Image (cartoon, grey):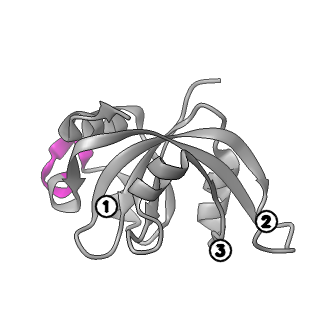
Amino acid sequence: MAKQYWLVKQEPSTYPFDKLVEERTTSWDGVRNYQARNNLQAMKKGDRVLYYHSGAGPEVVGICEVVRAAYPDPTTDDEGWVSVELKAVKRLKKPVTLEQIKREPSLAGMALLRQSRLSVQPVEQDEFARVEQLGGGRAL
């Protein structure tokens, strides 16, 4: 199966990318939106993920990889919710701001611009590559 690409959002005051770098992996849990949950369920081990700091100064700051596909969310007894395990792969040399994404013609179709509130969303391979290029990603 081909690798898929995603974007996850998190408030930097809640769980900044640097915390993921420090911890190496994390359970992406607590998602309570059905569309975001469906996206988590579609994630496969090896998929790449853009890490987006939402809120003030929204920007893509890093890249992660799915290291464990969907499993029951440990933060609830409701079997309908799932989590995935993410591993930090690289920090971008320079964050890619929402304003940059809006100005980049090749990113005009990103789900981020169409469904701005969705916390877990698909990203096309060429969109992922362009964001990574704009950020000058570097290995951790």
- Are there few (<14), some (14-19), or many (20+) residues within 10 Å of tag 1? few
Instruction: Note whether 139 is above or below 73 in the view shown.
Output: above
Say which residue label 2 marks. Answer: 74
| Residue occupying the point 41% across, 56% down | 17
Q: Secondary structure at mark 3?
A: loop
Residue lying furthest top: 1
Q: Residue 124 in the image: state x and y as whole percent.
A: 41, 39
Disc 3 vs disc 2: which is toward the camera? 2
| Residue occupying the point 63% across, 43% down | 43
Say which residue label 1 marks. Answer: 113
Say which residue label 3 marks. Answer: 32
Q: Looking at the picture, which amino acid does disc 2 mark?
A: Pro
| Residue occupying the point 36% across, 38% down | 128
Disc 2 vs disc 1: which is toward the camera? 2
Pick the front one: 4 or 133: 133
Over which residues does the magenta segment extend? Answer: 101-107
- Are there few (<14), some (14-19), or many (20+) residues within 10 Å of tag 2? some
